């Protein structure tokens, strides 16, 4: 059975994005998953009727257009989770133009583009935007300068967007998520990784806590989630 409520999850093919997609599918949502190339392992077969993939890089206009068209065809878009991201690290003096573009495209430009599309699609009926940053968006880490810059930029954009929407009394809610290190493919895909990631916890409890909180639709709610290792 296919749901009437749709969600877009960028970075749905792995790690935290896959955990968000799985949690939403379990809760009965129709999910449009966005990634450049990869697909999650089990989800497409298990949820053939409720999961559709859109492939393309998140900072490209055409990727956003295809994702939002798929999510709004015969359904009401209720949630956009911006989770696509890329680790690009290095010491000052080590970066090149491709490094800077990759970090900004995945972590900042795509998050802004998909948030802006979300606003125009959800302005009348409301909905939720969940923007995934990192604890790097709250700290200054010398070996992570452009990653840090992309996540601080995403935080600044997300908070400004929320203020703007509150000022116009919009029914759209905007959530900030700052995960700690997680054991995902992120670390093997990263440029000059600072760790292998084996010491970190899995991403599923983070997605579960965020989805549980936003599903409740409480009168007062938590708009910012910072996760630290226990
Ligand atoms: N892992 C950590 O320790 C950690 C800690 C704090 C915050 N985060 C953040 O959490 C988010 C998820 O990370 P993760 O650990 O789950 O990473 P992951 O396992 O590497 O998954 C990244 C996902 O994003 C997609 N992606 C990457 N660049 C993209 C682009 N330009 N356009 C479209 N899709 C793109 C990947 O698919 P394709 O490669 O097929 O495009 C994949 O689906 C990221 O924003 C990351 O910065 C991670």
Image (tube, rainbow, N blue to C red):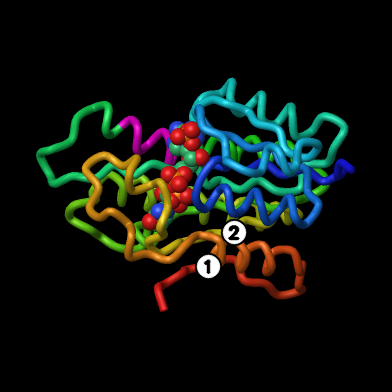
Q: Which residue range is magenta in the image?
A: 101-108
Horizontal arrangement in the rendering, residue 6 relative to residue 144 (left or right): right
Q: Quadrant of residue 72?
A: top right
- Tell me if the residue at label 1 has its CB under 8 Å from ligand 1: no
**Residue 80 at what x, y percent from top left?**
65, 45
Q: Is residue 124 left or right of residue 106?
A: right
Q: Please name the residue that numbered disc 1 is placed on.
A: 225
Residue positioned 19% across, 30% down in the render: 96
Of residues 176 and 206, which is closer to you in this image? 206
Q: Secondary structure at mark 1?
A: strand
Under circle 2, the secondary element is: strand
Residue depicted at 62% across the width and 64% down the height: 208
Please say whether residue 109 is visible from this viewpoint: no
Mark sitting on residue 71:
none
> Is 213 colored magenta in this rendering?
no
Q: Quadrant of the C terminus?
A: bottom left
> Going by the picture, which residue comes out furthest to the top?
62
Expressed as whole percent of the image width and height from the top left, the position of residue 133 reads: 45, 54
At x 75%, y 55%, the residue is: 26
Give the camera-side residue of 219 and 165: 219
Q: Are marks 2 and 1 in contact (CB under 8 Å)?
A: yes
Per the image, the residue denoted by label 2 is 175
Q: Relative to 73, is 227 above or below?
A: below
Left/right of residue 210 with respect to residue 168 in the rendered view: left
Q: Quadrant of the N terminus?
A: top right
Tell me: residue 225, above or below residue 101.
Answer: below
Q: Is residue 104 magenta?
A: yes
């Amino acid at each position: 059975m296919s749901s009437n409520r749709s969600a877009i999850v960028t970075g749905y093919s792995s790690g935290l994005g896959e955990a968000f997609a799985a949690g939403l599918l379990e809760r009965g949502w129709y999910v449009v998953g966005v990634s450049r190339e990869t697909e999650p392992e089990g989800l497409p077969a298990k949820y053939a009727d409720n999961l559709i993939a859109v492939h393309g890089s998140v900072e490209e206009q055409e990727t956003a257009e295809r994702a939002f068209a798929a999510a709004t065809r015969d359904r009401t878009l209720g949630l956009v989770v911006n989770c696509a991201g890329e680790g690009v690290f290095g010491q000052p003096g080590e970066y090149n133009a491709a490094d800077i573009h990759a970090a900004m495209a995945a972590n900042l430009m795509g998050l802004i583009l998909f948030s802006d599309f979300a606003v125009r699609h959800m302005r009348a009926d409301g909905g939720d935007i969940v923007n995934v940053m990192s604890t790097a968006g709250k700290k200054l880490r010398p070996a992570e300068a452009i990653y840090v810059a992309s996540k601080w930029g995403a935080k600044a954009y997300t908070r400004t967007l929320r203020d703007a929407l509150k000022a116009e009394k919009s029914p759209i809610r905007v959530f900030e998520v700052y995960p700690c290190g997680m054991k995902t493919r992120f670390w093997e895909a990263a440029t000059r990784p600072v760790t292998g990631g084996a010491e970190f916890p899995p991403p599923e409890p983070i997605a579960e806590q965020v989805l549980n909180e936003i599903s409740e639709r409480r009168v007062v709610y938590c708009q910012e989630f910072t996760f630290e290792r226990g």
